[in-house]
Amino acid sequence: MASNEPEHSREEEESAAAEDEDTGAQVAPIIKLEEVAVTTGEENEDPLLDLKAKLYRFDKEGNQWKERGAGSVKLLKHKETGKVRLVMRQSKTLKICANHLIVPTMTVQEHSGNEKSCVWHAADFADGELKNEMFCMRFASVENCKTFMEKVEEIAESQKSNEENKDASAAAGLLEKLSVEEKKEGEEKVKDEPTKEETASTPASDATPAKEKETESEKGKEPSS
């Protein structure tokens, strides 16, 4: 009875056996790749918050929301300046889709009809130039959205306090400078005024008193007849 299975030739079997055999030979790579350190620009910053979310930008021309990307949104505080910025990168490409400072005037509000979303305005630098944008961010849970909103408001308040302290320090420095200048002007004015000893040693005027002048003029007149 003929078999329906295909027959394998001897050559095919030997070839398959040769492929399975491990020769132990090692092939060195033609090009040696060196490890390159990748910088993200976040080395001098401390993360204050890191959450997963989806970002939308309002298109004024089309009058509609457009998706910017889904990924990780971070609030990063600079170690030296103390300034805090919002940075969001797309999860797969790591492309920046939001990059702006948290300023004292920034406010975040819950998006109408969705407790998982919030909206805000910012001067964003994600495209390499400052643009006034309106953003909407949607989180996976209501808790994450509230955490984000509360943290941003807390940072904005702290930045406002820092600005007020700087203004107060600048005003105090200006007043101190003015008081020092006034003090110097007063000292110079005192130096220019004559002392009592200098006034006493000043020679008397050569002018003759009015009474003596009148007497001399009377002596020179002849009596009338």
Image (tube, rainbow, N blue to C red):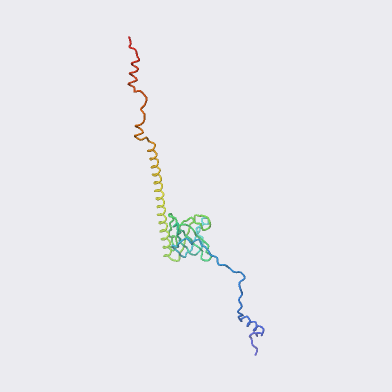
**Quarter occupied by the N terminus:** bottom right
Please provide percent x and percent y for residue 70: 50, 64
Provide residue 90's location: percent of width, then percent of height. 51, 64
Instruction: Say how many tags the image has.
Output: 0
**Extreme residue toward the bottom, this view:** 1
- Residue 179: quarter of image: top left
Rendering coords of residue 20 (x, y %)? 61, 81
Which residue is at the front of the view, 115 or 23?
A: 23
Give the vertical position of 180 relative to 11 (above or below).
Answer: above
Describe residue 143's horizontal placement relative to residue 41 as left or right: left
The x, y position of residue 213, in whole percent, is 34, 20
Q: Is residue 224 left or right of residue 76?
A: left
Q: Can you tell which quarter of the image residue 102 is in?
A: bottom left
Quadrant of the drawing holding the C terminus: top left
Q: Which one is in front, 185 or 107? A: 185
Of residue 170 and residue 123, the one placed in the foreground of this image is 170
Against 218, residue 106 (above or below) is below
